[in-house]
Amino acid sequence: MTLPERRFPDSRRCNVDDRPMPNDPVSNRRGLSNVHDRPLAPERYRSHDDGRRRFAYGRAGRRQVSVRWRAMLASVLIGVLSVGTSLQPAIAAARPVGGQAPGYYRMHVGRFEVTALLDGTHPFPSDKVAVNAKPGEVDALLAAQYLPPAFEGMINAFLVNTGDRLVLIDTGAGNLYGKEGGGLVSAIRAAGYTPDQIDDIFITHLHEDHAGGLLLDGKPVFAKAIVHVSKRDADFWLNDANQANVDDLLKPFFPAIQQVVAPYIAAGRFKPFEGEAPLLPGLTPIAAPGHTPGHTFYLLQDEGQSLLFWGDTVHMQPVQFADPNIAIRYDWNADMAVAARKAILARASAEHWWVAGAHISFPGIGHVVADNGHYRWVPANYTLNRITP
């Protein structure tokens, strides 16, 4: 049945999204809907005025509105669920592992293979132990290298394979620094060796972080190694009467050192030396008192190449290269320590020696460069595929 043609104002025609039909002569002709293109229902079923806008009713209109509201509700629910999901913490495919690899770095000095070993790192309280520094000087020099006053200090040791003997320079801290030391054995094994293979140990000085690794968990670490150290240092640290001559920071070192060397003394494998005669072919001690009474450098030389193991000449690389006059409270004699540092900085720079430092950022190997009355540290360039097997 065809409804009689009736005319309605444009504003009374609605499509399903409740907007007035445009002034379109085609859609205005015979009251046609632009969605279904069929006559609209009678007015009593088709429109209602709530004072604001008109909505389509009737069977077809109710169906379209119902579908539209269901779609809108679904969209809202999806949005809420999406927001809820986005608030959940992201879960990675694999959890972070943490930690670092056992530290070792390899290079050669002539025929000798040298392996730097990382025993650990610890917060070094430069602001509490620096001596002779101008106000703010230490903090400024550290900040220039993006380091805080209590920066991470290294505990490095060095392994030398001469072809005839396996030699260790210093042993790290062992258990004496808690979790911040004691990584030496892991580093030795990661580097392809075992502690039982080491023939000789040369200690630069008898401080906890250089001799503490002789013992680990109460047991000697090195089954056959002979321990060598300056007689002057051994006489000082193995005599409790000398506690009266050191800063309070150093008093605990006496019982600690006596404990770690005791098993080696008992086994007849603790052999202090005197003088500067070569201790092994290619390895020569150089006396450098100041940090301790018997502080000693070891100079390794072969085929025209040289590497100086200088122990505790430098504790704060960003600070003491720039200003060698700055000492630390751990120095037995600060004036002597400063004099020894200035002398060896000048010599190492002039001789173009490699230098291996116990407390310079791992691997602690590089060169010293003189720079307008100061010095700069030039670290070794990392090498992976050019090492002679």
Image (spheres, rainbow, N blue to C red):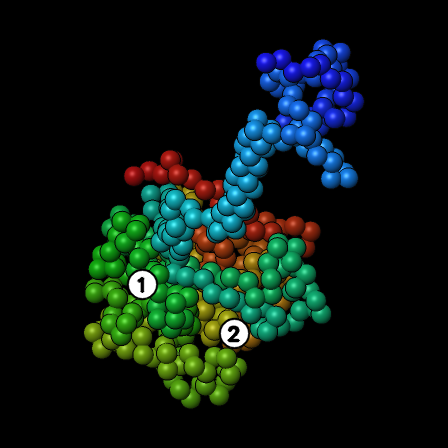
Q: Position of residue 379 (x, y in %)?
A: 52, 48
Sequence-wise, the earlier of marks 1 and 2 is 1
Residue hosting label 2? 330
In the foreground, 86 or 36? 36
Q: In the image, which is nearer the foreground, mark 1 or mark 2?
A: 2
Which type of secondary structure does the marked residue at label 1 adopt?
strand
Q: As displayed, is residue 334 above or below residue 68?
A: below
Q: Residues within 10 Å of mark 2 (few under 14, many from 20)?
A: many
In the foreground, 329 or 300? 329
Q: Give the quadrant of the C terminus.
A: top left
Mark 1 and mark 2: span between their CA atoms?
23 Å
Q: Which residue is located at x 34 percent, y 60 percent?
A: 184
Q: Position of residue 73 (x, y in %)?
A: 55, 40
Q: Which residue is located at x 21 percent, y 60 percent?
A: 196
In the picture, the disc for residue 201 is: 1
Q: Position of residue 334 (x, y in %)?
A: 57, 73
**In the image, what residue type sits under mark 2?**
Tyr
Q: Residues within 10 Å of mark 1 (few under 14, many from 20)?
A: many
Q: Can see residue 288?
A: yes
Q: Quadrant of residue 118?
A: bottom left
Q: As displayed, is residue 120 above or below residue 17?
A: below
Q: Position of residue 42 (x, y in %)?
A: 66, 24
Q: Give the quadrant of the N terminus.
A: top right
**In the image, what residue type sits under mark 1?**
Ile
